[in-house]
Image (spheres, rainbow, N blue to C red):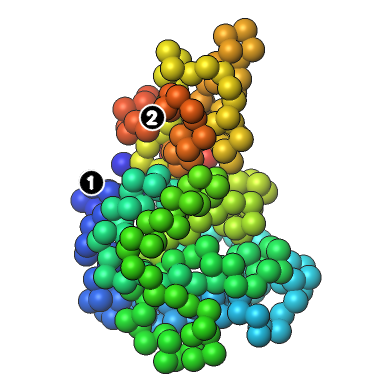
Amino acid sequence: MCEFCIKHGEGKKWYLQMKNYAEELLHEELSSAQKDIVKAKTRLEWNLRFFENFTMAADSRFSKTQDESEDTPSSSETSEVQRTEHEILEERKVIHFGQVLPIEDVEKVIDMVDSITRMPCGCRFISTGKTDKRYCFGLGVDKWGILGKFPDAASSLEVLDKKEVKRIFREYDNEGLIHSIWTGVTPYVIGLCNCDRDCMAYKLYIEKVGTPYFFRAEYICQIDWDLCTGCKSCMSQCQFGAQFYSSALSKVYIDPSRCFGCGLCRATCPNDAIKLVPRHKEPEAADIWLRNVPR
């Protein structure tokens, strides 16, 4: 199990524990150490600030240009240069950290929560300049009074029913977008996202090989070579460089030490040759959650 499962899930998947979605957790006063890191007294205070700076920034009325967003580092990015990767990572785990989820676990999360609000993606605005790209799904955020607090953004938000959310996530699964779940001052869960290279967390962590922003999934993917025909369809879906082709055998191989367990490769396999298996059952991947080495 990942570190969050041990700390916040009592050895079970932390994102499937109702206590991590509780309003009591949202409103409780943070510890002195947490306050020093997140610069807020409660999780609600931090999340409202995050919403205003992230989601509101993706609104078409936001004045910042794409070039300004990409070329000007934030104050946090500037300060991070002076610290070690370990220090940066430990703070991220407290403030805002994620984990990759396969579609099955996404749907379990959807079934658990009271409300789901689809909202513009601040990452896509920063990376592409496009506004109102709704790849982010806030969990329970309509109960925070956001629509009244930020009326100008109300038209960019959609409160959806669970059936519709599942349909959209299935579409994104087929499209090849990585599903992830995120905290807003850990362990409180604030949202589900759909990531690719335009997601800043993916871009900075995976593409730029920077400090991690999210854990790998609790699973890895494996290929049944009796069913694999070597069509290579699955290779186009892998955004983590975990799949390799054997010309001699006409088969695809998934390197367990590189697999993030997103499960997207299954969507294009015409022979159902790919399955998810628990990460802890594969010795080569059991203790790999961030880099390609055991934690």
Residue depth check, mark 1 versus mark 2: number of the one nearer the observer: 2
141 lies left or right of 128: left
What is the crowding at mark 1: few (fewer than 14 residues within 10 Å), some, or many (at least 20)? few
One can see residue 281 in this view: yes
286 lies left or right of 62: left
The image shows residue 18, relative to residue 4, as above or below, that is below
The one of 211 and 60 positioned closer to us in this rendering: 60
Disc nearer the start of the sequence (1/2) = 1
Q: Which mark is residue 289?
A: none
Between the residue at mark 1 and the residue at mark 2, the CA separation in whole angstroms equals 23 Å
Taking the spot 57% from the left edge, 9% from the top edge, the residue there is 249
Taking the spot 40% from the left edge, 44% from the top edge, the residue there is 102
Determine whether the residue tagged by mark 1 lies in a helix, strand or loop.
loop
The one of 78 and 247 positioned closer to us in this rendering: 247
Q: Quadrant of the C terminus?
A: top left
Residue 64: percent from left, percent from top:
71, 80
Determine whether the residue tagged by mark 2 lies in a helix, strand or loop.
strand
What is the crowding at mark 2: few (fewer than 14 residues within 10 Å), some, or many (at least 20)? some
Taking the spot 53% from the left edge, 21% from the top edge, the residue there is 253
The image shows residue 225, relative to residue 94, as above or below, that is above
- What residue did someone put label 2 on? 275
Residue 274: percent from left, percent from top:
43, 27
What residue occupies the far top of the structure in this picture? 248
Residue 186: percent from left, percent from top:
36, 64
Q: Which mark is residue 11?
A: 1
Question: What is the three-letter code of the residue carrying label 2?
Answer: Lys
Question: What is the three-letter code of the residue carrying label 1?
Answer: Gly
Residue 175: percent from left, percent from top:
55, 47
